[in-house]
């Protein structure tokens, strides 16, 4: 089974630092095949500036900066090529509305296997609308993950400080 | 939480013809915006030479090109750098 986790901003982190730190995390040297849709994956500063430029254009530089999703694959994903191909396909789900920076990490730091990190700009480049991480929307994404991977997906998310899980 | 300076707390009215009102309202609806949001967009960005949609898609093309250079012609790193810097210049024009 594949798991999709939405990560919330740590409370002690400033909004501006959150976006920069997230870009830094995805483009860290341990990342496998980092890439982006609508954003450069070559440098942290460029990725940050390009995401911030969209926010500035629509006058939405404050508030929630990004959505961080982690998709953990099960034992059926055994190579980095396989994981990278999946990460590219899964990140493309949002590419028609939002900038997405993504990478894959291999099994380490106590994780069970390959997993993909996706940083999604909270402001849409198409119309400036904010990303809505509602249960319905996240569920639709999970259905897409299930369709692409051919496996069941378990979604972990927080709503109003409560933690929920859902299978799809 | 949205900061005070980004809250749209001011209200004004503008004069329009019947035809303009219909046309602008229809366009706004088509783009999924309110009339106010649509007019604000037009006013804020009327001098822009690039827009986010175009830039994002150009960046996607640049990303593919840079990926191909990295994979098949890693010795041509200068070309990838040039591409990156050209894109940076375009992004700087977005305001």
Image (tube, coloured by chain):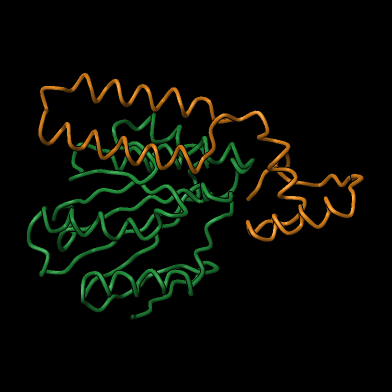
Chain colours: A green, B orange
The outermost residue toward the front is: B19
Query: Which residue corresponds to the image point at 39% horizontal and 30% vertical from the top-left?
Result: A46
Query: Which residue corresponds to the image point at 70% horizontal and 42% vertical from the top-left?
Result: B6
Residue A149, quarter of picture: bottom left
Question: Residue B35: x, y in percent?
Answer: 76, 54
Q: Is residue A82 above or below residue A144?
A: above
Question: Residue A79: x, y in percent?
Answer: 7, 57
Q: Is residue A130 above or below residue A26?
A: below
- Horizontally, residue B80 falls left or right of residue B14, namely left
Q: Nearer the viewer, residue B35 or A16?
A: B35
Query: Which residue corresponds to the image point at 28% horizontal and 69% vertical from the top-left?
Result: A3
Question: Residue A23: x, y in percent?
Answer: 36, 40
Query: Which residue corresponds to the image point at 77% horizontal and 54% vertical from the top-left?
Result: B23
Count all numbered tags in the image, as a single digit. 0
Quarter in which the C terminus of chain A is drawn: bottom left
Q: Nearer the viewer, residue B81 or A122?
A: B81
Quarter in which the N terminus of chain A is drawn: bottom left
Question: Residue B13: x, y in percent?
Answer: 90, 46
- Horizontally, residue B15 falls left or right of residue A100, namely right
The outermost residue toward the left is: A78
- Horizontally, residue B83 falls left or right of residue A94, namely left
- Horizontally, residue A39 falls left or right of residue B74, namely right
């Amino acid at each position: 089974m594949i798991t999709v986790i939405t990560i919330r901003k740590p409370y002690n982190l400033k909004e501006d630092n959150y976006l920069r730190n997230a870009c830094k995390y995805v483009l860290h040297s341990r990342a496998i095949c980092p890439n982006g849709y609508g954003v450069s994956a070559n440098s942290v500063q460029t990725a940050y500036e390009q995401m911030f430029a969209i926010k500035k254009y629509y006058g939405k530089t404050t508030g929630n900066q990004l959505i961080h999703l982690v998709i953990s694959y099960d034992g059926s994903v055994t190579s980095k090529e396989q994981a990278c191909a999946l990460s590219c396909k899964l990140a493309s789900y949002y590419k028609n509305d939002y900038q997405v920076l993504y990478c894959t990490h291999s099994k380490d730091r106590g994780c069970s296997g390959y997993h993909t990190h996706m940083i999604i700009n909270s402001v849409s480049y198409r119309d400036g609308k904010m990303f809505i991480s509602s249960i319905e929307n996240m569920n639709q994404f999970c259905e897409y993950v299930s369709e692409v991977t051919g496996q069941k997906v378990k979604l972990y998310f927080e709503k109003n400080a409560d933690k929920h899980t859902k299978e799809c | 939480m949205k900061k005070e300076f980004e809250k749209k707390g001011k209200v004004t009215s503008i004069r329009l013809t019947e035809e303009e009102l219909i046309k602008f309202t229809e366009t706004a609806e088509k783009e999924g915006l309110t009339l106010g949001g649509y007019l604000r967009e037009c006013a804020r960005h009327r001098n822009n030479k690039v827009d986010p949609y175009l830039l994002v898609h150009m960046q996607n093309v640049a990303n593919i090109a840079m990926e191909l250079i990295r994979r098949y012609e890693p010795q041509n790193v200068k070309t990838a750098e040039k591409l990156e810097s050209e894109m940076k210049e375009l992004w700087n024009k977005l305001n």
